[in-house]
């Protein structure tokens, strides 16, 4: 079973039709579809809800939330889960310029934890000039992971460019996971991220992701499986193939407590 934990059907600077998303997702068994901040949260969540409810066995939507401005009431999030079929939440702290531990964000995590809604922090490059890079730091999630020990937290794109902080978070907190969405064009970055995760003994905390539409899931799987081939004719350290395969075949939905 292959689960892609990081895909979009719309996003700033990208264009993909739902049918193209569905076709590109053909090689995987399930996808998490993250709503985007390219329009109002309400509109974006409705768009994702419409798509995932049409493919409820394969597509699992995460609703976008800006806790500072959006509805964070338990009533709204219960309805998002039960009526709109959205299984998690995604936050764009750097892009939407709010501190991940803002007082209203903390109120939101309380609600999310009580409803068993996992939260995905999408603070990945490329950052626009007005994004707040400081708010992308994975170490800012430490306080949240400690305060909400039952809240499942996913650090998007391994918290790039702050990968070392992400590795520290994964090693420290049982409830924190890393989205290994790799940019297949950046071979050296992939190599260093995976080797560092292996050395930090956190490979079991990584989820497979593609970042669709920026990468195709198929290409990402091939890149990961061909990882050690990158190192042919070098003396660079390798990572056991079964450990990499473990990421690709991880039952992310089950770990996050998500079911159709
Ligand atoms: Zn993304």
Image: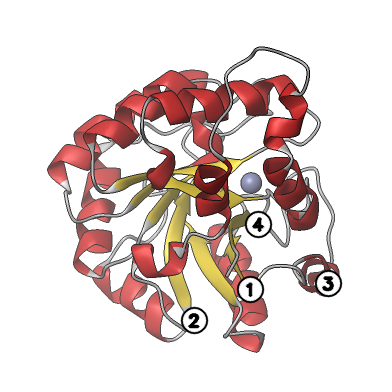
Q: CA distance from mark 2 to mark 1?
A: 21 Å
Q: Which residue is mark 1?
A: 29
Marks 2 and 3, the one that precedes in the sequence: 3
Q: Is residue 250 above or below residue 177?
A: below
Marks 3 and 1, the one that precedes in the sequence: 3
Q: Position of residue 196 (x, y in %)?
A: 48, 23
Q: Residue at x 76, y 23 (%)?
A: 232
Say whether marks 4 and 2 touch (CB < 8 Å).
no
Q: Which residue is mark 3?
A: 23
Q: Which mark is residue 84?
A: 2
Q: CA distance from mark 1 to mark 4?
A: 13 Å
Q: Within 8 Å: ligand 1 and the Cβ of disc 4?
A: yes
Q: Residue at x 22, y 51 (%)?
A: 107
Q: Is residue 185 above or below residue 132?
A: below
Q: CA distance from mark 4 to mark 2?
A: 18 Å
Q: Which residue is mark 4?
A: 7
Say whether marks 3 and 1 touch (CB < 8 Å).
no
Q: Residues within 10 Å of mark 2 (few under 14, many from 20)?
A: some
- Examine the image and state in which quarter residue 183 appears: top right
Closer to us: 196 or 111 = 196
Marks 2 and 1, the one that precedes in the sequence: 1
Say whether marks 2 and 1 touch (CB < 8 Å).
no
The label nearer to you, 3 versus 1, is 1
Q: CA distance from mark 3 to mark 4?
A: 13 Å
Q: Residue at x 69, y 35 (%)?
A: 227
Q: Does residue 7 show up? A: yes
Q: Secondary structure at mark 3?
A: helix
């Amino acid at each position: 079973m292959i689960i892609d934990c990081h895909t979009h059907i719309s996003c700033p600077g990208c264009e993909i039709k739902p049918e193209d998303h569905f076709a590109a997702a053909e090689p995987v068994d399930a996808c998490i579809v993250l709503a985007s901040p390219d329009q109002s949260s309400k509109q974006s969540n409705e768009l994702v809800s419409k798509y995932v409810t049409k493919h409820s066995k394969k597509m699992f939507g995460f609703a976008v939330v800006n806790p500072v401005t959006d509805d964070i009431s338990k009533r709204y999030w219960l309805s998002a889960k039960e009526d709109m079929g959205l299984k998690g939440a995604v936050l764009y702290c750097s892009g939407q310029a709010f501190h991940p531990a803002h007082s209203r964000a903390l109120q939101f995590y309380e609600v999310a934890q009580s409803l068993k809604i996992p939260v995905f922090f999408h603070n990945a490059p490329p950052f626009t000039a007005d994004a707040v890079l400081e708010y992308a730091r994975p170490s800012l999630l430490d306080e949240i992971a400690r305060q909400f020990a039952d809240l499942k937290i996913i650090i998007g794109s391994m918290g790039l460019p702050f990968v070392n902080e992400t590795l520290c978070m994964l090693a420290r907190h049982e409830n924190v996971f890393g989205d290994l969405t790799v940019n297949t064009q950046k071979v050296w970055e992939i190599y260093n991220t995976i080797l560092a995760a292996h050395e930090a003994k956190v490979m079991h905390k990584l989820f497979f992701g593609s970042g669709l539409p920026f990468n195709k899931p198929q290409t990402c799987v091939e890149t990961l499986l061909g990882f050690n081939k990158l190192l042919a004719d070098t003396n660079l350290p390798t990572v056991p193939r079964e450990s990499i395969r473990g990421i690709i075949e991880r039952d992310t939905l089950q770990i996050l407590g998500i079911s159709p």
